Image: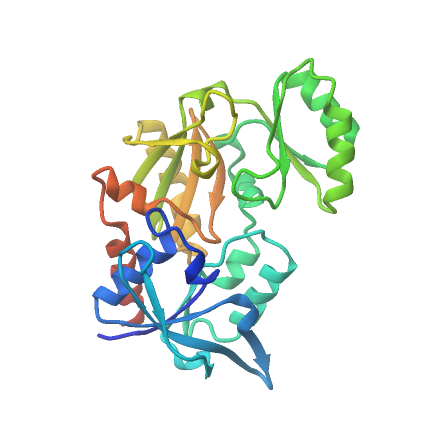
Amino acid sequence: MSLKIAVQMDHVSTVQIAGDTSFALSLEAQQRGHQLFHYTPDRLSLSDGKVVARVEAMKLADEKGRHFELGEPVRTDLSEMDVILLRQDPPFDMNYITTTHILERIHPGTLVVNDPAWVRNSPEKIFVTEFADLMPETLITKDPMEVADFRRKHGDIIVKPLYGNGGAGIFHLLEADRNLASLLEMFGQIFREPYIVQRYLKDVRKGDKRIILIDGEPVGAINRVPSDTDSRSNMHVGGRAEKTELTDREREICARIGPALRERGFILVGIDVIGDYMTEINVTSPTGIREVKRFGGQDIAGLFWDVVEAKRR
């Protein structure tokens, strides 16, 4: 079975192929004989009720500096595609939300992965609060008094944007830190939305584990350890990836959330776990599958396409 697959992503020329999940998924699709097409979100349109984009035929090679070839842009009705991979990176802003409204017009006749309506309705730092007993203590607010009360109760805290990504804007504030009021003033000038505040988890020094789930089942994990000078474990800000295995607690977390992921049509999900607590459920463009394979884990791209091909059949 040969599928026509369009990938909605940040431009392929910008990806770092050694760790890019969108590239790995697309490369596996190509190796299976599927036809690949590429477009960026700014080329997506809703025209007289039809969802269209100027797409380019795409060929990939796992070779740094020579990893892609694109054909000429062709205005295409996306309902002619079998699969759309919704893979542009956040921020999860109104532009991102608008693309989900547009793609919803053709799903599931054209299978959009992940389901655009549920992506829109499941912001990563809010969806996770449906499982409050699996999380550290968490506050979502813009009220400075609520934040101050929360810190008095829990001591060290993490403050971060509700719709941020990639570790940007994450602050670790000690119990006696005098910068809280200034930080909240700055956040108030930058962000219209509430902020998220969580009890600081000391286990983050041992790593922030990214666990990948396919169709609600855990299939691999990688541990990301922050540098000595940073509280963030994101690898592009200096975090170190290392091999890991799932603990009994992490399997319990996956078993609890698995049914909810399947109900929402989330085929590819990445969750973040620190110690015994889940902190995020990533459904927009989760990453980590190349790192898992590099450390001897499963070929998650292959497992992903097994599920997608079965759904198309």
Q: Nearer the viewer, residue 19 or 160?
A: 19
- The N terminus, quarter of image: bottom left
For residue 304, above or below residue 170: below
- Residue shown at the point (56%, 22%) measured from the top left: 200
Above or below for 65 versus 141: below
As drawn, the residue found furthest toward the front would be 65
Name the residue nearer the viewer: 257 or 91: 91
Where 143 sits versus 39, above or below? Answer: above
Horizontal arrangement in the rendering, residue 242 relative to residue 298 (left or right): right
Residue 14 in which image quadrant: bottom left
Name the residue furthest bottom. 48
Q: Left or right: where does residue 190 sit relative to residue 108?
A: right
Q: Which of the pair 86/73 is nearer the observer? A: 73
- Residue 89 percent coordinates (x, y): 50, 54
Residue, far top? 176
Q: In x, y percent, where is residue 121?
A: 57, 55
* Residue name at image x 45 percent, y 27 percent: 226
Q: Which quadrant would the C terminus be assigned to in this image? A: bottom left
Q: Residue at x 48, y 35 (%)?
A: 237
Residue at image point 34% right, 64% down? 68
Residue 188: image x %, image y %? 77, 39
Please indicate whether residue 149 sits to the left or right of residue 258 in the image.
right
Q: Is residue 178 above or below residue 170?
A: above
